[in-house]
Amino acid sequence: MPKVHVRKGDTVMVITGKDAGKKGKVVTVEPAKSRVTVEGVNVVKRHQKATPQMPQGGIVEKEAPIHSSNVMLFCNKCNKATRIQKKVLDSGNKERICKHCGELLS
């Protein structure tokens, strides 16, 4: 199964496409398709048929997945999109670290 460089709950910045420059949290990750869903990014309109939960139906806006190569992890300390560096800590755990400032990204 292919790997994706971001995890659910990470803050990311979109680097290409119509939503370039937008930041948001990763809502879902689909490693098999290399796609991620980011809140507030790639919002599409879908026609919703009336159901008992939503009796009026109508047009609903929701986020659609985008390719994982179009997002970069965002470091809050240096306030920019960054690549990650993996480092083994003294406890033996692998952690992700910002390439710019060395901040721990969890």
Image (spheres, rainbow, N blue to C red):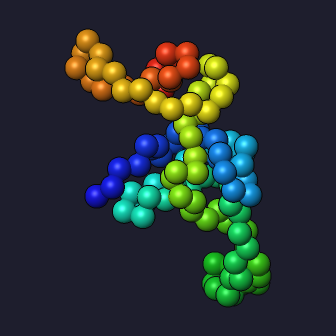
Rendering quarter of residue 89:
top left
Please provide percent x and percent y for residue 75: 59, 27
Q: Residue at x 62, y 19 (%)?
A: 77
User: Where, by quadrant of the figure, is residue 85 drawn?
Assistant: top left
Answer above or below: position of 92 versus 70: above
- From the viewer's perspective, is residue 41 above or below residue 105? below
Quadrant in the picture for residue 63: bottom right
Compared across the picture, whether 66 is left or right of 31 comes to right
Identity of the residue drawn at 68% across and 82% down: 48
Q: Count the marks: how many?
A: 0
Q: Is residue 9 visible?
A: yes
**101 and 11: which is toward the camera:** 101
State whether residue 52 is above or below residue 34: below
For the point 61% across and 65% down, the residue is 64
Q: Is residue 24 left or right of residue 32?
A: right
Query: Which residue of the protein is positioned furthest toward the left in this rendering?
Result: 92
Position of 30 compared to 80: left or right? left
